[in-house]
Image (cartoon, helix red, strand yellow):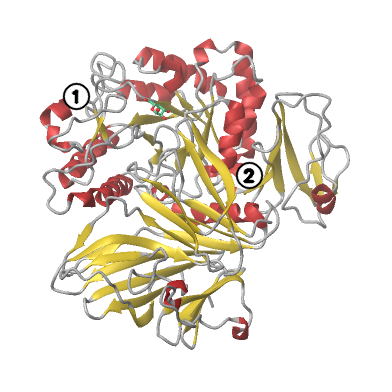
């Protein structure tokens, strides 16, 4: 039984964990437990009570409430901050009831209510038992006759056990340099990471892991999670200074407002979190499993090997140049040919064209279909790049609808990469994009869309907004999801890739619509090793699109560059017309190898054996779903000689079973490979791809 009620406590059991909360003697909904699965109810600690009193430190301040609202003498971060119609800013949430929701997963709803202002809070808990993850979100319902202003409406507050000084792991970066992993000890106060950029951002990611400072890749308690949201978000990791830590996460309250009208419901995005005793690697695998089994639209579809024309032709695309690339790609075994930026009306460079999504009549006088037919005749599917949220001032769309972009009437409209942002909060903009993209997909045989978004926001105004214009922040993301959802329902066979100048929109929200993420515009193989390591903290290899390009061509061996990209969903992005016949033959070899091993990489489990950010000798291993086959990639970047590489200790094997590792004459037990390890000899910028086979 995944959801159990004992007295006035609720226990949510996953395969290996229990998350529990309940009512204390004051009737407050407080957190009770989050850790290894509880076998007997007697192991459940009591619901925390307010004890003692001091005029500066009222104990209610420290109660680990499941969804604290700002009220009374509570100075820690709340989930909810509200102003009522009479300017009262003190929200008292009283337990009403609990209900099981009809769902394909165990799903509990706890209802709290402010009795004076008739604000109802429905806290949703869904149990993802196999991935050891709890999903939570909140619905805020105005049952009164007057509007209620929401000033903060987070999704969740998580409470790891009190009494530990936690280490907080998170990801930071910038364009072309995303997903740096940092681990830092929390000290009293609030550590905030957030996005105010309209998208998830390259700078921080709404992912976290907390541990007591002693967890490793393979061992130790870790509490971890992520927010499913692609707009502004905020994460507050708070050490209260009273030996307790809490982590609040949700839509950013910076410049946020939402006037909840009578009868209206505001639904927060979902937050996901889990617990493991087996270190950061296991924490990642839980999130990987969740993403693969519950979020992405086509979980069991193997991604084809793709070719993308961007780095070869930039904006200079036309049918002959694309066909030449397509022919070379097809000869190498590529299965999907993607034409990137530059194909639409007026697009010669980045100064014009965005908004006018019809084929450029000079480049494609007969439209795209002749090219698509040739690509399909070569045995490949066809994909296309779009950037629907953007408009160049030099475009027919902007000339017709200058009011459709985000702007303030008295301020200059600042461009980024010469483009302005269409206000996707507007229903007319949503309808236009839906129709335009639906036509594009209906009139062409397109199986893949790379959906890009290439600037951060400025002047986030909506002058003719029907309500508070600050609702734009949330409505924009809802608009984006609505368009993606509509297109997906009309064209379910199409795969979407989320790109925002690389990894600027990488989150669990967009993965409900997109099967893939373009991780970074940085395709330099050694840099990618580090970026991919950060990305893998929460995302599985299946969603990680990785291209072999011309970056470091001639300096880093092609095999090394292929091996790096084969750790995800393989793509090619180099200018094939410049590749020698030998390079293309070698590429064909690696593509064939990849096709053979990709079920292991895309559907299997991932183990980070050695970190590329910690050492120039790194390795990552994948194991098939049934555990019978594996692949090991090892990389040496620059390590001064003489260097003795330590043996690679494999992970995830059955200790008793016998395994053969490619290149090693003798098979050994799983225990041997995991404890004694595999000796490897690699020179600088050499790599290895070795298959692992369980013997009968
Ligand atoms: C962004 C993407 C690139 C490419 C260009 C095209 O930078 O990340 O891969 O599509 O836009 O303009």
Q: Is residue 144 above or below residue 534?
A: below
Furthest-front residue in this view: 55
Task: Assess whether mark 2 and mark 1 are in contact (beta carbons under 8 angstroms).
Answer: no
Q: Residue furthest right?
A: 666
Choose mark 1 or mark 2, whichever is in front.
1
- Bin the neighbour count of mark 2 within 10 Å (Cα to Cα): few under 14, some 14-19, many 20 and up: many
- Helix or strand or loop: what does disc 1 sit on? loop
Q: Position of residue 300 (x, y in %)?
A: 51, 49
Ligand 1: image quarter: top left
* Quarter of the image that includes the N terminus: bottom right
The residue at 82%/57% (across/down) is 656
Relative image position of residue 566 (x, y in whole percent): 60, 34
Q: Quadrant of residue 157?
A: bottom left
Q: Secondary structure at mark 2?
A: helix
Frontmost residue, 445 versus 631? 631
Q: Is residue 564 left or right of residue 657?
A: left
Q: Nearer the viewer, residue 294 or 223?
A: 223
CA distance separating discs 1 and 2:
46 Å
Q: Which mark is residue 600?
A: 2
Mark 1 is surrounded, within 10 Å at the Cα level, by few (under 14), some (14 to 19) or many (20 or more) other residues, namely: some
Q: According to the image, label 1 marks what residue?
A: 395
107 lies left or right of 579? left
Observer-nearest of 614 and 58:
58
> Residue 335, how many percent across, how many down?
50, 30
The answer to whether residue 647 is seen in the rendering is yes
């Amino acid at each position: 039984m995944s959801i159990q009620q004992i007295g006035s406590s609720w226990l949510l059991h996953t395969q290996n964990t229990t998350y529990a909360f309940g009512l204390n003697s004051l009737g407050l909904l407080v957190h009770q437990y989050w850790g290894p699965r509880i076998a007997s109810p007697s192991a459940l600690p009591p619901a925390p009570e307010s004890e003692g009193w001091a005029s500066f430190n009222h104990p209610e301040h420290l109660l680990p409430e499941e969804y604290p609202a700002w009220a009374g003498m509570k100075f820690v971060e709340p989930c909810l901050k509200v102003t009522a119609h009479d300017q009262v800013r003190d929200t008292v949430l009283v337990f009403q009831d609990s209900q099981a929701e009809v769902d394909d997963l165990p799903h509990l709803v706890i209802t709290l209510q402010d009795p004076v202002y008739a604000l109802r809070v429905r806290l949703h808990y869904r149990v993802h038992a196999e991935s050891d993850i709890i999903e939570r979100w909140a619905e805020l319902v105005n049952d009164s006759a007057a509007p209620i202003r929401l000033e903060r409406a987070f999704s969740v507050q998580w409470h790891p056990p009190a009494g530990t000084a936690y280490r907080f792991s998170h990801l930071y970066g910038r364009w072309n340099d995303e997903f740096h992993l940092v681990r830092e000890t929390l000290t009293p106060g609030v550590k905030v990471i957030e996005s105010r950029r309209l998208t998830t951002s390259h700078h921080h990611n709404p992912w976290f892991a907390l541990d007591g400072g002693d967890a490793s890749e393979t061992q130790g308690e870790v509490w971890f999670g992520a927010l499913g949201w692609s707009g502004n978000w905020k994460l507050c990791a708070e050490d209260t200074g009273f030996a307790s830590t809490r982590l609040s996460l949700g839509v950013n309250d910076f410049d946020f407002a939402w006037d909840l009208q009578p009868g209206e419901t505001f639904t927060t995005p979902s937050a996901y979190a889990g617990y493991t005793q087996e270190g950061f690697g296991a924490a990642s695998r839980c999130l990987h499993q969740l993403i693969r089994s519950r979020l992405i639209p086509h979980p069991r579809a193997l991604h084809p090997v793709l070719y993308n024309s961007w780095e070869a032709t930039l904006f200079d695309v036309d049918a002959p140049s694309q066909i030449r690339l397509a022919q070379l790609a097809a000869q190498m075994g590529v299965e999907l040919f993607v034409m990137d930026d530059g194909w639409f009306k007026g697009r010669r460079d980045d100064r014009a064209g965005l908004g006018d999504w019809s084929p450029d009549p000079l480049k494609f006088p007969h439209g795209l279909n002749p090219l698509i037919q040739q690509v399909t005749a070569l045995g490949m599917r066809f994909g296309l790049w779009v950037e629907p949220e953007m408009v160049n001032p030099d475009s027919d769309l902007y000339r017709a609808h200058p009011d459709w972009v985000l702007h303030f009437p008295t301020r200059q409209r600042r461009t980024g990469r010469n483009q302005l942002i269409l206000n996707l909060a507007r229903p007319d903009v949503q309808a236009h994009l839906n129709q335009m993209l639906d036509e594009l997909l209906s009139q062409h045989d397109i199986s893949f869309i790379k959906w890009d978004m290439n600037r951060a926001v400025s002047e986030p105004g909506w002058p003719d907004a029907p309500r508070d214009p600050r609702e734009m922040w949330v409505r924009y993301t809802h608009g984006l999801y609505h368009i993606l959802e509509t297109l997906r329902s009309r064209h379910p066979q199409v795969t979407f890739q989320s790109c925002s100048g690389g990894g600027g929109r990488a989150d669990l929200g967009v993965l409900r619509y997109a099967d893939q993420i373009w991780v970074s515009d940085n395709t330099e193989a050694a840099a990618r090793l580090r970026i991919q390591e950060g990305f893998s903290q929460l995302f599985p290899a299946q969603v990680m699109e990785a291209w072999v390009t011309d970056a470091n061509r001639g300096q880093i061996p092609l095999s090394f560059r292929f091996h790096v990209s084969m750790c995800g969903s393989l793509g090619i992005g180099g200018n094939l017309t410049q590749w020698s016949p030998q390079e293309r033959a070698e590429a064909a070899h690696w593509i064939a190898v990849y096709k053979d091993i990709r079920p292991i990489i895309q559907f299997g489990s991932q183990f980070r054996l050695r970190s590329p950010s910690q050492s120039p000798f790194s390795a990552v291993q994948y194991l098939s779903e049934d555990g019978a086959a594996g692949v090991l990639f090892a990389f040496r970047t620059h390590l001064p000689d003489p260097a003795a590489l330590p043996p690679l200790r494999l992970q995830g094997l059955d200790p008793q079973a016998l395994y053969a590792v490619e290149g090693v004459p003798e098979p050994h037990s799983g225990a041997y490979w995991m404890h004694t390890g595999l000796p490897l000899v690699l020179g600088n910028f050499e790599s290895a791809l070795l298959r692992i086979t369980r013997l009968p």
